[in-house]
Image (cartoon, rainbow, N blue to C red):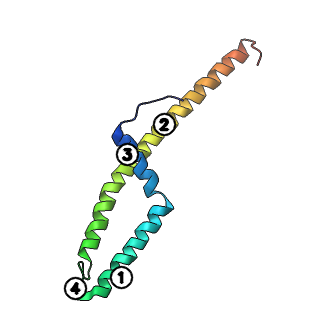
């Protein structure tokens, strides 16, 4: 396989994508959202983010705005790795066919 040096930012994007695509992330987000909403509903007027939960909405917007492009960058890099793997496989098949055509024994 073709080896490439990855930058720290690329490794971080891949790690974020692996984590944000996991069940731990989904369950953790769901639990924290329910917990935040329940806490603020229960505290009523004393809540740090009373209904309509503007801080909650802002947080979700910022997270999704920043997370989306990072995930897309990681997906582009995975596509590049897949393309390099296919090109390497094609080169191996071409060498094998050339070997067979010249009468080589496998």
Q: Which residue is mark 4?
A: 46
| In the image, residue 41 above or below residue 86 | below
Mark 2 to mark 1 CA distance (whole Å): 44 Å
Q: Position of residue 49 (x, y in %)?
A: 24, 78
Q: Residue at x 28, y 86 (%)?
A: 43
**In the rendered view of the protein, which quadrant contains the N terminus?**
top right
Earlier residue among tags 2 and 1: 1
**Residue 12 has which mark?**
3
Mark 4 and mark 3 in contact? Answer it, CB < 8 Å.
no
Outermost residue toward the top in this view: 102
Report which residue position mark 1 lands on.
38
| Front position among marks 4 and 2 | 4
Is residue 92 positioned above or below 16 on the image? above
Query: In terms of depth relative to the viewer, which is nearer, 51 or 106?
Result: 51
**Residue position for label 2:** 81
* Farthest right residue in view: 105
Q: Earlier in the sequence, mark 4 or mark 3?
A: 3
């Amino acid at each position: 396989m073709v080896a490439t040096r990855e930058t720290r930012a690329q490794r971080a994007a891949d790690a974020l994508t692996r984590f944000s695509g996991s069940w731990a992330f989904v369950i953790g987000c769901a639990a924290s959202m329910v917990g935040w909403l329940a806490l603020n509903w229960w505290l009523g007027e004393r809540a740090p983010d009373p209904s309509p939960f503007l801080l909650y909405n802002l947080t979700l917007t910022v997270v999704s705005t920043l997370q989306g492009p990072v995930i897309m960058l990681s997906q582009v890099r995975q596509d590049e790795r897949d393309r390099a793997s296919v090109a390497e496989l094609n080169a191996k098949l071409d060498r094998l066919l050339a070997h067979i055509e010249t009468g080589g024994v496998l």
